Amino acid sequence: MQTSALLKRWRRWVAGWAVSAVLAAPALAQQPDTEACVNCHERVNPGIVAQWRSSEHAKAKVLCSQCHAAEKTDPDAYEHHGSTIATIVSPKDCGECHAKEFAEQKGSHHAKAGQILGSLDNLLGEVVGGPPAVDAGCRQCHGSVVRLGLDHKPTKDTWPNTGMGRINPDGSWGSCSACHARHEFSVRQARQPEACGKCHLGPDHPQIEVWNESKHGVMYHANRESMNLDANPWRAGQEYFSGPTCSSCHMSAGGRQPVTHDVGERLSWTLRPAISVKLNLVAFEGDAKEDILGDAPTLPKVGDLFHLGAAPDRKVTAVLTWQDRRARMQEVCSQCHDKSFVEGAYSQFDEVVVLFNDKFAKPAKAIIDELRATKRITPVDFDDPIEWTWYELWHHQGRRARHGAAMQGPDYTWWHGMYEVAKTFYQEFLPQVKEVAGEDGYKALLDKYVYTIPGHQWHRDGMSKDALQRIQDFYRQRYGQ
């Protein structure tokens, strides 16, 4: 830890120690700094003080100055009624007391959520939409660089911001209050699915909707009062055994698995890109982590010096294959399900991902790539109708299908997922291919990329007479028509 950080931590500790008896006194009168903060904010922002008073921080005698104190040299430090403070309490600040949690969060998918500047999502927001939509929309979940004005306070276009991957003035990534809402910072609140549902919902990543329709969601809502959400420890199958929440599977303890603040540690597929791939993890000194993609890539060993892309060599401290990551998740599952159930659920999930990849995503992407290479469409994204169709096919409909299968939400797997994928592919995407490639180009592309896949041959040859007859017989027998 650097000297400045040690000094800052020492000063905060001294401030807390000096007022260790103060919390018992309603007016907090023995400590001028605390008295000033509380007396003023109780008049101006009474909710903030009420939240703090009910928090575990207050019980542990953690005061305003211990979180908001700043050194005069800090980039976001400013004078506030005689004290030097900072508005933003970053993960690095929280890490002075919560070191383990900060180390786990530091290299996680959540911490990296703000790094979407090169993605199609960002192009849509910034260019096709507009910056105000990004400020009030995208950045409130993903986070962004917090800029400072001449007064050293965050600028209005970048604050407020509790984006999970917020890039803070002290260089840290993330926002603890994205899950543990200030100023109560409740563990109970962070364990409930609504905490995750702020961001994980909607047409492209409807995890909260999928979870609500799953058996997990149904059982949680039926047994919420028995979930022991304030318990410490809070372990699946022990302190609670019905209706796991998001944090149960992705963060909480279960079996031999400890609590982790790296929400991606137990993920074995990435469902974010057009074509899903397996996820292997390499951790480095300094708590950095990187995913290495693929079923069986060449992975370094612990102790190796290793780099990805243009990054410098770093010493490897841990390696998790996608099988290791899956095993960690399955151990949590096994606290409530037997082995055959867990393996069956994963097999069904894998088959849906492979189906989407092989039948729809790979051929559609190959066609888009060839249309660009042959200049049938321009290299600029979203200026051709077919590019919007392709984007929604994988980014919205394909993700819904994959997330539905991952979390056992049948309606999202099929009707909101694969049904929409198939309808869009056959009724919108392929006709647009024909429009831009011409009759001969269309036939060549389908013969090359589509009809080589058995699941598409019905589109060329039609359904069999036997299949059609079975459908007619079913409706006649069941509905008399």
Image (tube, rainbow, N blue to C red):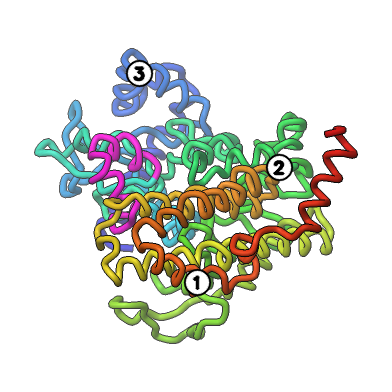
User: Of the residues under marks 1 and 2, which one precedes in the sequence?
Assistant: 2
The quadrant of the rendering that contains the C terminus is top right
Label 3 secondary element: loop
Residue 71 lies left or right of residue 473; in this view the side is left
User: Is residue 26 one of those drawn in magenta?
Assistant: no
Q: Which residue is mark 2?
A: 214
Q: Nearer the viewer, mark 2 or mark 3?
A: 2
Residue 204, above or below 460: above
Residue at 83% in and 51% down: 470
Q: CA distance from mark 1 to mark 2?
A: 35 Å
Circle number at residue 45: 3
Amino acid identity at mark 1: Tyr
Residue 331, above or below 53: below
Amino acid identity at mark 3: Asn
Task: Name the residue furthest right.
Answer: 477
Residue at 35% in and 37% down: 137
Give the percent coordinates (x, y) of residue 331: 72, 62
Residue at 55% in and 51% down: 421
Magenta residues, as a range? 114-141
**Mark 2 nearby-residue class (10 Å; few <14, some 14–19, many ≥20):** many
Give the percent coordinates (x, y) of residue 135: 28, 38
Residue 455 lies left or right of residue 399; in this view the side is right
Amino acid identity at mark 2: Ser
User: Is residue 137 one of those drawn in magenta?
Assistant: yes
| Of residues 303 and 34, the one drawn nearer to the viewer in this rendering | 303
Q: Nearer the viewer, mark 3 or mark 1?
A: 1
| Of residues 72 and 273, the one drawn nearer to the viewer in this rendering | 273
Q: Which residue is mark 1?
A: 449
Q: CA distance from mark 3 to mark 1?
A: 62 Å
Give the percent coordinates (x, y) of residue 239: 76, 44
